[in-house]
Amino acid sequence: MSEAQWIWKPGQEFIERTNVFRFMTHLGIESREEFLRFSRDDPESFYDALVNEMGAEWSEPYAQVLDTSRGVEWARWFVGGKLNIAWNCLDRHAQGAAASRLAIVWEGEDGSSRKLTFAELYTEVSRLAHALESLGLQKGDRVALYMPMVPEVVVILYACFKLGIIVVPIFSGFGPRAVATRLEDSGSRVLFTADFLERRGKLLPLKEKADQACQNAAALEKVVALRYKGGEVPWNTARDVWWHDLVKNRPAERESLPLDSEDRALILYTSGTTGKPKGAGSLDHHGESLLRGYGLSVRRRVRLSPARPPLGDACAPPNHDAGHFPHGNSPADAEEPRLAAAARSHFAAAARLDRRALG
């Protein structure tokens, strides 16, 4: 692309304020090509340095960055290490100097807005984590999300991460058949949904579609519904529970479990446009997910250091591989980090904590 075709090009001052530039400087690397070559040629050294650059905290240090002894397709990352995404992205900031900083700034399609600080978000996440335990959920269980684009998605994500529960994000635009396939294949025990979904000014019956999808989900035990827009919805008194009832009077603190780097965090399904959706090949683990978030963000100038938790920008929908991590931010040392948490960035908002938390 010629110089004249660029719509915008950052100046040198802007470039030098970005986190990728800072990381390259710490590595003693001067060019993008050399940076990419280092990541390809020596991934163990590259990702070891990246973990340090992020300031990620481990409950037990890893003994080896990368193990490909079973073949690259079965690579294991950060062997022996234990950590928790929720601790790194939320807890430590909610309990520290960043407690009063904004973690979520959300704006709905109708213009309504909500804000949550790290401390407030930690409270909501902890209450939901206790509620999940009250349902009998434990490490390794699956929880599916079929939600509108709201901050509660963030709460669900980190509550599950706290307990080692595996998250199965399902795009809210899918119909009952597509949702049913993912519920059945993942063996999800709980489905989170809402009364309605707002899209382009229209209210769509999300709970009704969820009910249709649940008919053949053998492992499903509970449907947790968020009262988002109000109005009458179909209800199964033996199975369904309102979010506000589930979290009422739950404790406001819950520690995050130390989890193996290879413990599963998410099951991400393919779209299914060319055949049955595949989830087994789309597993994200705790160590990998934390780096994946930074790996995406480092290209968009987001820093994961505890010094200044930033806000991310709008992200992909929750069914996409990138959807669970925040994308983008102003430079790391900007006076006021910004967040364009448009309605469509809901699941993204979820992990947006990621970035903010790791300033």
Image (spheres, grey):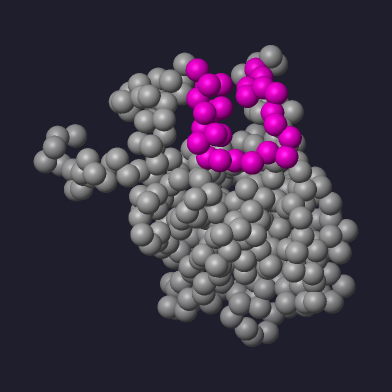
**x and y percentages locating residue 338 in the rendered image:** 39, 61
Query: From what the image shows, is residue 200 above or below residue 166?
Result: below
- In the image, the segment drawn in magenta is 42-68
**x and y percentages locating residue 190 in the rendered image:** 78, 59
Q: State the image quarter where residue 155 is shown.
A: bottom right
- Magenta includes 45? yes
Observer-nearest residue: 201 or 55?
Answer: 55
Query: From what the image shows, is residue 207 above or below residue 324?
Result: below
Who's the residue at 61% across and 77% down the image? Answer: 228
Residue lying furthest front:
97
Who's the residue at 11% across and 41% down the image? Answer: 4
Residue lying furthest left:
4
Query: From what the image shows, is residue 345 above or below residue 235?
Result: above
Who's the residue at 80% across and 63% down the image? Answer: 130
Q: Is residue 157 visible?
A: no
- Magenta includes 332? no
For the image, the number of numbered tags is 0
Q: State the image quarter where residue 340 is shown.
A: bottom left
Who's the residue at 50% across and 17% down the image? Answer: 42
Give the quadrant of the N terminus. Answer: top left
Q: Is residue 37 visible?
A: yes
**x and y percentages locating residue 225 in the rendered image:** 71, 72
